[in-house]
Amino acid sequence: EKVADALCRERDALRVQLESLKDERARVSRVEGFEERFKEGVSIEYLRNVLIKYIETQDHAKLIPVFHTLLDFTPQEKQRLEAASRRLDATWNKPVSSFFSFQ
């Protein structure tokens, strides 16, 4: 009977610990979620500004590493962006007369 009582007390103590651990896990998850949302918010604002700068300027090559870092591009995606940037830069550098064909 003493052993059964001791086991019941231990079981009850373990239940209390389990509930405490569940509460702690929930708090940690909430904090991590807030941290992640904060980081995303900062990154989104920064990304927005970089994108505007990319569109406004002709010097795209300097901004590609920023996009690469922010968006975690694969090496293949980075190469595609660099190739597209070179094509776009070549278009920007063409003389205006090359866009018109006068016959």
Image: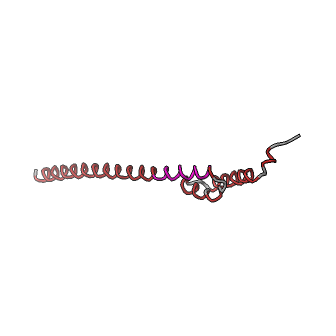
- Work out which residue is located at the far left of the displayed protein and give it: 1
- Magenta segment: 42-55
The residue at the point 39 percent across, 53 percent down is: 35
Find residue 94 and report its horizontal and vertical position in percent: 77, 52
- Work out which residue is located at the far right of the displayed protein and give it: 103
Find residue 55 and report its horizontal and vertical position in percent: 62, 49
The residue at the point 51 percent across, 53 percent down is: 46
The residue at the point 27 percent across, 49 percent down is: 23
Find residue 34 and report its horizontal and vertical position in percent: 38, 50
- State yes or no: residue 10 in magenta: no
- Left or right: where does residue 48 sit relative to residue 28? right
The residue at the point 18 percent across, 49 percent down is: 12
The residue lying toward the viewer, choosing from 14 and 37, is 37
Image quadrant occupied by the C terminus: top right
Find residue 31 and report its horizontal and vertical position in percent: 35, 52
- State yes or no: residue 52 in magenta: yes
- Work out which residue is located at the far top of the displayed protein and give it: 103
User: Which secondary structure is most common in the magenta stretch?
Assistant: helix
- Left or right: where does residue 36 sit relative to residue 98? left
- Left or right: where does residue 92 sit relative to residue 29? right
The residue lying toward the viewer, choosing from 76 and 15, is 76
The residue lying toward the viewer, choosing from 12 and 21, is 21
